[in-house]
Amino acid sequence: MNHYSNFKIRMAVHALKQGQIIAYPTEAVYGLGCDPLNENAVINLLNLKQRPIHKGLILVASDFSQLQPFLKPTATMLAQIMPSWPGPVTWVIPAQAWVPNYLKGKHDSLAVRVSAHPLVQQLCAAYGGAIVSTSANISNQAPARSALAVRQNLNTQGLFIIPGTTPKQAQPTAIYNALDGSCLRIS
């Protein structure tokens, strides 16, 4: 397992706690992340990406316990979901009533993933919770696959970028609906 610089992880955690946006490698592409409970940070992330708020966002975690407070899955859903984690599979699960619209968009559910990427695992463990995870790109443009691509394609002022690698052939993660198991996006 790769171990990313503890210093870089600590700096990223500090940035998250200060309401900043971070960019980091994931299972498939570079992601943009922030504290999911900091509305200003999420709105800044959506503005940076030029992503409409109604679409909703993904939360990523190192462990299901970090996602659990946001969700209200049934036992049947959990039986279907848990074998796929940690891994590159995102599930759309009914959200708790308190989950803000700036996270879930126009939906009553939330997209979530327990990541297997070593950096994401270390980052969420050090942060002590789930973070927002969306591809590091302007909406409808190709996602960044390197720190250099993030710098070239986005306004990186105030953005903390963690250097790292993404798999060369990887596609964006598959997304499934926990209500019926249907595939919403194939990887």
Image: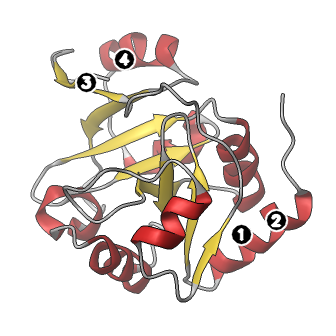
Task: Residue 20 in the image: state x and y as whole percent.
Answer: 56, 81
**Pick the front one: 162 or 17:** 162
Image-quadrant location for residue 37: bottom left
Left or right side of 57 for 84 = right
Residue 34 seen in this snapshot = no
The secondary structure type at the circle numbered 4 is helix
Task: In the rendered structure, find residue 178 and report the number of the disc placed on it.
Answer: 3
Vertical position of residue 137 compared to residue 107: above or below:
below
Image position of 65 with respect to 53: above or below: above
Q: Position of residue 162 (x, y in %)?
A: 69, 62
For label 3, the crowd category at 10 Å Cα-Cα, with few meaning under 14, some 14 to 19 and many 20 or more, is many
Identify the residue at image location x=33%, y=30%. 91
The image shows residue 100, relative to residue 15, as above or below, that is: above
Q: Is residue 92 above or below residue 43?
A: above
Residue type of the residue flagged with mark 2: Lys
Q: CA distance from mark 1 to mark 3?
A: 31 Å
Q: Which residue is mark 4?
A: 75
Give the CA separation, mark 4 to mark 2. Answer: 38 Å
- Residue located beneath label 2 in the image: 8
Check disc 2: other Cα within 10 Å, few if <14, some if 14-19, many if 20+: some
Q: Say which mark, if any, is on residue 12.
A: 1
Q: What amino acid type should be assigned to the residue bearing mark 3? A: Ala
Mark 2 or mark 3, earlier in chain: 2
Q: Are marks 2 and 1 in contact (CB under 8 Å)?
A: yes
Q: CA distance from mark 1 to mark 4?
A: 35 Å
